[in-house]
Amino acid sequence: MNKRKIDNIIEDLGQIEFDERASAKFKFKDIFSKVIFKNPSMAIGSIMIFLLIILAIIGPSIAPYDSQELNMSERFESPSWNHIFGTDNMGRDIFSRVLHGTRVTFKIGLASVGIGLAFGLLIGLFAGYSRGKLQNVLMRFIDILYSFPALLIAMALVAFLGPSTRNLIIAVGIASIRYYARVTYGVVLVERNKPYLDAAEIVGAGALRQMFRHLIPNIVPPLIVVATLGFAGAVLNAAGLSFLGLGVQPPTPEWGLILSSGRNYIIRAPWLLIFPGLAIMVAVLSFNIFGDGLRDLLDPKQQRKV
Amino acid sequence: MGKPEKKGRALTTVVASNPTNIETLLRVENLDILFGTAKQHVVAVDGVSFKINTGETLAIVGESGCGKTVTSLSIMGLIPCPPGIIDNGSIQFNGKDLLHLKMEEMRKVRGNDIAMIFQEPMTSLNPVLTVGLQMSEAMMAHKGISRKEARKRAIEMLKLVQIPEPEKRMEQYPHQLSGGMRQRVMIGTALSCEPKILIADEPTTALDVTVQAQILDLMNDIKAKLDTSILFITHDLGVVAEIADRVLVMYAGRTIEEALVTELYENPIHPYTEGLLRAIPRLDQYLSADNSVKEALKQMPGIVPSIYKKIEGCSFAPRCPYARKQCGQERPVMKEVVPGHRAACWKPEW
């Protein structure tokens, strides 16, 4: 009997629904004030990575000496103001070589993470999305890869392809595919059952569209974390292979290789090993710290606070 | 049963039963859906038949697990196979048999001819894509229009579903919208390709009552504007009264009663429907003048039979106050008891 009145009330109440939710635009300066400096490991890691990237870019041009210039009169000089990291058995400046090596290391790390991530993502995505035969075939393949140490796979590949910087990148990349495939697979399995995929299917999206348009953006956060930590692993693997003579070939200044060529003089000139070793450690450590911070940040439980 | 029908409704009954005047858009016949393997399975949907005419709202009512959602998903071709098996029956849409369409053809039907909205507006939108992108995507795929046009049309759709400042909302992500708005966006997306049928699977269940009322109003409004048929799935008889033209009651995977909405409320035939209607709390009936309780709310004894048990006879017989020996042995089929009112029950014959 009072239906009209009730209708009016409902209409009035309806207006309340249209409240303003969180502000629409993400402000760039918030990245620093709210994200990075709230999280100490993120702050330290990102500063270190930032410095390393700067060094990788400008390093070769600020290096005091040519990285490959031989100077037989200044062999095995201990660290001094002239050569702050000392010189090696051919009189080359270690500081300049380490600086040049930053760029080489970043190149290897980025490229091999790229290879591993691209293939791992595809395998994990198809396996997780398809359910059924394809899923089994792909993930058993990944299981097989998991039954060897990564370094062993990379060594076998380099032995097969021949040692060079390009082949090192390929080998380290392929050896890390399994890692990315597993993570992607796990995340896709979770996202696969969410209604938004059904909703996409209902408006007529095909399998590829569902995977690449709808799934990938949702699985990116954990993959960023894994890729950051994977970068550190790739640098380490590449240095290890170069140390064994299976990676970058002399005279290219790569940290693992500098370390390797200095190992015969460990008693006489320990700086040949200390400084490239420290460089590897700093690079790996900063990516690990940054990755940990990123993981805390992208953890879904914490996301709301940001 | 001999109750005289109201004039307006009686007229619709005649029209609805006359196939030359109203086109049947969707016809589901004898649909059986099993889950499991051929050897060991449970029956989720058991011989369900119904049809939807153009511009009509059919509500499927029933409690949880009675096969409402499975029925609607089968129309969209979304029953995962395995474990789902569509054992028998046909789904005809505009003369096409949806059960035997190829993947490609089915994709054209989805969204374009038949659209669907879900119960959970919170999770049916992709959290990392903007509202506008998700809306225009479907139109670009189905209508082959450019991004710009799709965007323009998406804004129109948002206006249609009464979202203020549609241009601004287009750029926002689902978490920036309230539940009611998300369901509006879902409805807008579903309707953007002008589907002939909109399947709404409990679209208001996750919303609070005032928002629920708005969404129902909106759906009625849009139906009148676009002449879309609606298949409305719900367990809420109050919602049915507001939106449906015809009602189909399901119980334990079977259809047990079908009638025009007023007819069903005034004159339920099946004891289950009767029980459901009596279990709705009503403001006017149960309180006396001094506010003391006059009559307690009626409840139905028993629970829904387990899906793992094979049912002989009428599935409602164990809970039915009128059950006789025949009910436990012979399965009643859907029969027209009163013109336009069908039920699967032996009682009218006694």
Image: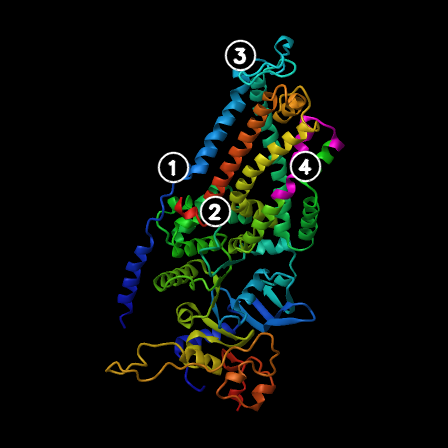
Q: State which tag comes first along the sequence, 4 or 3.
A: 3
- Percent position of residue B132, x then y: 45, 46
Pair 4/1: label in front? 4
Pair 4/2: label in front? 4
- Give the residue type at disc 4: Leu
Q: State which tag comes first along the sequence, 1 or 2.
A: 1
Q: Secondary structure at mark 2?
A: loop
- Give the residue type at disc 3: Asn
CA neighbours of label 2 inside 10 A, class few (<14), some (14 to 19), many (20+): some
**How far is disc 4 from disc 1 in space, using C-alphas?**
40 Å
Label 4 marks which chain's residue? A
Tag count in the figure? 4
Q: Which residue is mark 4?
A: A151
Label 2 marks which chain's residue? A
Q: Which residue is mark 3?
A: A82
Q: State which tag comes first along the sequence, 4 or 2.
A: 4
Q: Which residue is mark 1?
A: A30
**How far is disc 1 from disc 2 in space, using C-alphas?**
18 Å
Query: Which residue of the protein is positioned furthest toward the front in this rendering?
Result: A267
**How far is disc 1 from disc 3 in space, using C-alphas?**
43 Å
Q: Are marks 4 and 2 on the same chain?
A: yes
Q: Which residue is mark 2?
A: A299
**How far is disc 4 from disc 3 in space, using C-alphas?**
38 Å
**Above or below: residue B24 compared with residue A235:** below
Q: Secondary structure at mark 4?
A: helix
> Which part of the image, by quadrant, shows the N terminus of chain B?
bottom left
Q: State which tag comes first along the sequence, 1 or 3.
A: 1
Label 3 marks which chain's residue? A
